[in-house]
Image (cartoon, rainbow, N blue to C red):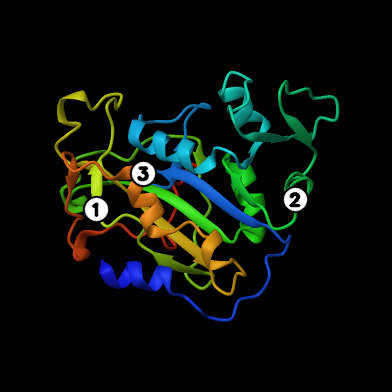
């Protein structure tokens, strides 16, 4: 784990500029089959991950699609600059700015700024070519070979992460008990379901070292020793790279 941390903090490779001149970060919680949503709701409850999301995005611009905004009861996230992307030129989002394309939304922010893209599925798809980093909360069984949980069902999925395009640094050195409420899994919710945070940086992306989402920054928000557990053995880790999505996606 120390090697991953050191590599993430000391990368000095030559990097090309972000296509839009911003640090564009896709942030999402992803289930075992790449699911991220079901009927405009999250399929799980991860209070610790939501706390991390809030701490990292406060004070920063957040970009979301119309459906994601409406899933938030059509209310802006407090203490953040909210930009809603929609094709409806008559759409009104109180307390938010409105943009009519993903590119337009990002270009509304100041050059050099850090922009978080927070969903949903089609917005993540559109943002992938512009992204400089991915911050993924990965939800998985403590031992995936035991199949303690059926894959979460859903109708929205995160895009495939192409190994040829991304470098990885394991953001959290430990994994954490995942949820306080999992519909249908109350009896076994603490038996094997865990989550960890993983950071991916686009190969060649021009992201200043001091501006990056660092390993220690993530861990400082997540670390609670009473519930921290050792990560699963390397042989049982779930790999987000090139993972096939559900046939229903």
- In which quadrant of the rendered image does the N terminus lie? bottom left
Q: Position of residue 245 (x, y in %)?
A: 45, 50
Residue occupied by mark 2? 110
In space, the residues marked 3 and 1 are separated at their CA atoms by 13 Å
The reply to whether residue 46 is in sight is: no
Residue in the image at 18% along x and 39% along y: 227
In space, the residues marked 3 and 2 are separated at their CA atoms by 27 Å
The answer to whether 37 is drawn above or below residue 160 in the figure is above
Residue in the image at 40% along x and 31% along y: 43
Which secondary structure, mark 1? Answer: loop
Residue in the image at 16% along x and 31% along y: 188
* Residue 174 - label: 1
Give left or right: position of 246 versus 236: right
Q: Are marks 3 and 1 in contact (CB under 8 Å)?
A: no
The foreground one among 196 and 247 is 196
Residue occupied by mark 3? 221
**Residue placed farthest to the right in the image?**
89
Between disc 3 and disc 1, the foreground one is 3
The foreground one among 28 and 33 is 28
Classed neighbour count for the residue bearing mark 3: other residues with Cα under 10 Å, few (<14), some (14–19), many (≥20): some
The number of discs equals: 3
Classed neighbour count for the residue bearing mark 2: other residues with Cα under 10 Å, few (<14), some (14–19), many (≥20): few
The answer to whether 181 is drawn above or below residue 121 in the figure is above
Specify which label sits upstream in the sequence, 3 or 1: 1
The foreground one among 115 and 130 is 115
């Amino acid at each position: 784990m120390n090697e991953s941390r050191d590599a993430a903090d000391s990368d000095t490779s030559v990097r090309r500029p972000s296509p839009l001149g911003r640090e564009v970060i896709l942030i999402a919680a992803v289930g075992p089959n790449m699911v991220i949503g079901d009927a405009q709701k999250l399929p799980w409850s991860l209070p610790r991950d939501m706390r991390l999301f809030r701490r990292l995005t406060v004070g920063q611009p957040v970009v979301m699609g119309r459906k994601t905004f409406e899933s938030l009861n059509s209310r802006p996230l407090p203490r953040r600059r909210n930009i809603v992307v929609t094709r409806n030129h008559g759409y009104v989002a109180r307390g938010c700015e409105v943009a009519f394309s993903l590119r337009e939304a990002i270009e509304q922010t100041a050059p050099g700024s850090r922009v978080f893209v927070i969903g949903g599925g089609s917005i993540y798809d559109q943002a992938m070519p512009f992204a400089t980093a991915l911050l993924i909360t990965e939800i998985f069984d403590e031992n995936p070979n035991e199949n303690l949980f059926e894959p979460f069902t859903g109708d929205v999925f995160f895009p495939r992460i192409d190994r040829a395009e991304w470098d990885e640094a394991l953001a959290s050195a430990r994994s954490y008990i995942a949820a306080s409420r999992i519909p249908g899994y109350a009896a076994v919710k603490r038996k094997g379901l865990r989550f960890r945070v993983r950071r991916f940086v686009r190969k060649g992306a021009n992201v200043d070292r001091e501006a990056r989402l660092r390993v220690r920054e993530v861990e400082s928000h997540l670390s609670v020793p009473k519930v921290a557990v050792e990560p699963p053995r390397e042989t049982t880790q779930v790999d987000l790279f090139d993972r096939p999505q559900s046939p229903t996606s």
